[in-house]
Amino acid sequence: MLEEIRQQPSALERTLEAEAAAIQAMRQRFTGKRPKYIVLAARGTSDNAAQFARYLIEITTGIPVSLAAPSIYTLYQAQLQLQDALVVAVSQSGESTDINLVLESAARAGAQTVAITNEAESTMARLAQEVILVRAGRELSVAATKTYTGQLMAFYLLAYALGAPLSLDHLRRIPASVESALALYPQVYEHAIRYRFMQHAVVVGRGINYANVFEFALKMMETCYVIAERFSIADFHHGPIAMLERDFPVFLFAPPGVASDSAAGLLDKARQLHAETLVITDASNAAMTAVAERKLVLDGVVHDAALPDDLFTPIPYIVPAQLFAASLAEHKGLDPDAPRTLSKVTKTI
């Protein structure tokens, strides 16, 4: 797991450069036939990547996006009307049975289809009209890391193809910001020692990093066996905040921009209740770095004055969270590469 976390800068570069020409061609095709809405189909870590895509595509293109409920297709055999839709299936292996059934059903219903996968020869890649290939190399760790960030990069490329005001130069700066995030490993390792007896926690964030909330919690659940609840900051105030008490662990994604005030307000409340907080932020968010007692501060995160401040934060922001899960597993005497009852490819109907 740790080795694959460290492979992410090169994997992201490969994905971007190898797919750039095909994405330019896709952008031309979508100019003539832009979908009216988009449906994303995924499970597990890939579903977290899809959650990111929902925010990214709606923010940057205005096209409505929904997340598919695969059981609608597999258990209820419902026939949906998808003539003006783009259906995007996401799977590391490309062999998720239920997601592939969604893709097949969507094509029969008249939708355009795209697959995002790490396996060029997979069933999913054969079924889809278009493929965006994540060039992460074979992922051996059960806990997905480099394929998650690769999927996020693929969704940036898809958003660009759909007409989003992104530039490939923006995306080319992301691998360097991930390299900077990897340099936080010694700090992450030391922070993780403090949590070695942790049995439960909450992970919170808002906006485009909401997907990372789910992904960080998932990594702690599957590698460290911590009961990690995940909430948007807004939803957390609608009841779950009642859980907070002295020493209760709270992990907070706090990028600059539109969600910054929400994060600062929650941090202030958690400190009043003497909860145990750890904040992931970056050097541009001076207000947060000044008030957070325990924090992981990233350098080199991409920001652009013409776009939302947090638009390019999700890929580098998840890296210290991945490192934390791997480090915590070590401190707890667990093997993150052999989580109990899990296998690399999960097939469900």
Image: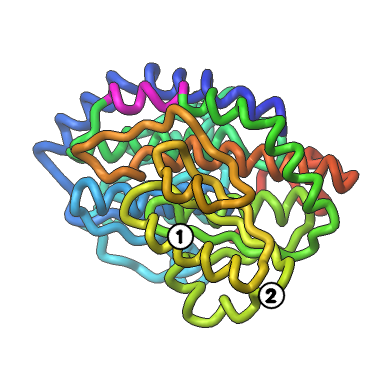
Q: Splitting the image into 4 quarters, where does residue 136 fall?
A: top right
Residue positioned 31% across, 43% down in the render: 309
Q: Splitting the image into 4 quarters, where does residue 37 fall?
A: bottom left
Q: Is residue 33 left or right of residue 189?
A: left
Check the image and report above or below for 117 versus 276: above
Residue positioned 45% across, 36% down in the render: 283
138, 201: nearer the viewer: 201
Disc assigned to residue 242: none
The main secondary structure of the magenta stretch is helix
Residue positioned 48% across, 30% down in the render: 299
Circles 1, 2 touching at the beta carbon (< 8 Å) = no
The crowd level at tag 2 (other Cα within 10 Å; few <14, some 14-19, many 20+) is some
Of the 4 image quadrants, the one containing the N terminus is top right
Residue at the extreme front of the image, as rendered: 290
273, 310: nearer the viewer: 273
Looking at the picture, how far across and down is residue 11, in whole percent? 52, 23
Q: Splitting the image into 4 quarters, where does residue 206 fall?
A: bottom left
Q: Is residue 215 left or right of residue 276?
A: left
Amino acid tagged 2: Glu
Residue beneath disc 1: 263
Q: Which color mode does the image show?
A: rainbow
Looking at the picture, how far across and down is residue 120, in whole percent? 49, 27
Of the 4 image quadrants, the one containing the C terminus is bottom right
The stretch in magenta equals 168-176
The crowd level at tag 1 (other Cα within 10 Å; few <14, some 14-19, many 20+) is many
Q: Is residue 89 visible?
A: no
Amino acid tagged 1: Ala
Check the image and report above or below for 56 versus 326: below
On whether residue 332 falls in the magenta region, the answer is no
Residue positioned 64% across, 40% down in the render: 322
Residue beneath disc 2: 245
Disc 2 on helix, strand or loop? loop
